[in-house]
Image (tube, rainbow, N blue to C red):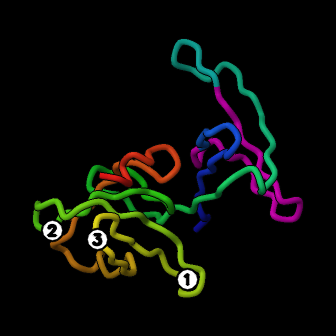
């Protein structure tokens, strides 16, 4: 299974989604992205962009979807519910030491491996933003 990524361009404060990332070149430490332009609902033209790794933040997909079918990525902010009751928002991050996605509660001082939340069927979650485009949600 090919990993999926999205890329936050720090200087432009802009997100490229998985389908717009054409290549990740680890040897030269750069990515190639595209901006597709549509005319009458069909692709008409596109611009190609090159970014060095120091200009971007790459976020890997968990390959999981929230309760609304939205793909969940590293850096996403999730609203956590337990049997329909909203518990609060949490930030999804990657932990290199443990090689797992971690879920960090924002309103309380709590952190747990994401797979523990997934294994409890009483929990549901939905993406309410990400740490780059929706910082205001971190304060909620």
Q: Magenta span: helix, strand or loop, mainly?
A: strand
| Residue 6 location (% of width, % of height) | 59, 52
- Horizontal side of 78 relative to 86 (left or right) equals right
Q: Are marks 2 and 3 in contact (CB under 8 Å)?
A: no
Q: Earlier in the sequence, mark 3 or mark 1?
A: 1
Q: Nearer the viewer, mark 3 or mark 1?
A: 3
Q: Earlier in the sequence, mark 2 or mark 1?
A: 2
| Residue 51 location (% of width, % of height) | 79, 46
Question: Distance of mark 2 from mark 1, alpha carbons?
Answer: 26 Å
| Residue 100 location (% of width, % of height) | 50, 80
Crowding at mark 2 (Cα within 10 Å: few <14, some 14-19, many 20+): some
55 lies above or below 90: above
Residue at the top extreme, as displayed = 40
20 or 133, which lies in front? Answer: 133
Please give the residue where the numbered disc 2 appears in the rendered image: 82
Residue at the right extreme, as displayed = 28
- Horizontal side of 137 relative to 43 (left or right) equals left
| Residue 79 location (% of width, % of height) | 28, 57
Question: Distance of mark 2 from mark 3, alpha carbons?
Answer: 16 Å
- Horizontal side of 102 relative to 3 (left or right) equals left
Q: Is residue 118 magenta?
A: no
| Label 1: which secondary element | loop
Magenta segment, which residues?
A: 17-36
Please give the residue where the numbered disc 3 appears in the rendered image: 108
Instruction: Identify the disc placed on residue 99.
Output: 1
Give the residue at x 39% y 72%: 103
Q: Is residue 28 magenta?
A: yes
Q: Are marks 2 and 1 in contact (CB under 8 Å)?
A: no
37 lies above or below 52: above
- Image quadrant where one finds the N terminus: bottom right
């Amino acid at each position: 299974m090919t990993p999926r990524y999205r890329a936050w361009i720090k200087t432009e404060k802009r997100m490229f989604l998985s389908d717009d990332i054409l290549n990740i070149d680890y040897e030269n430490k750069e990515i190639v992205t595209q901006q597709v332009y549509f005319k009458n609902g069909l692709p008409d033209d596109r611009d190609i962009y090159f970014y060095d790794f120091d200009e971007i933040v790459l976020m890997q997909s968990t390959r999981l979807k929230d309760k609304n079918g939205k793909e969940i990525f590293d850096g996403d902010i999730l609203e956590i519910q337990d049997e329909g009751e909203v518990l609060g928002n949490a930030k999804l991050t990657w932990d290199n030491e443990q090689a797992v996605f971690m879920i960090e509660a924002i309103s309380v001082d709590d952190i747990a491996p994401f797979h523990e939340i997934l294994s409890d069927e009483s929990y549901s979650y939905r993406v309410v933003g990400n740490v780059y485009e929706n910082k205001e949600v971190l304060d909620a």
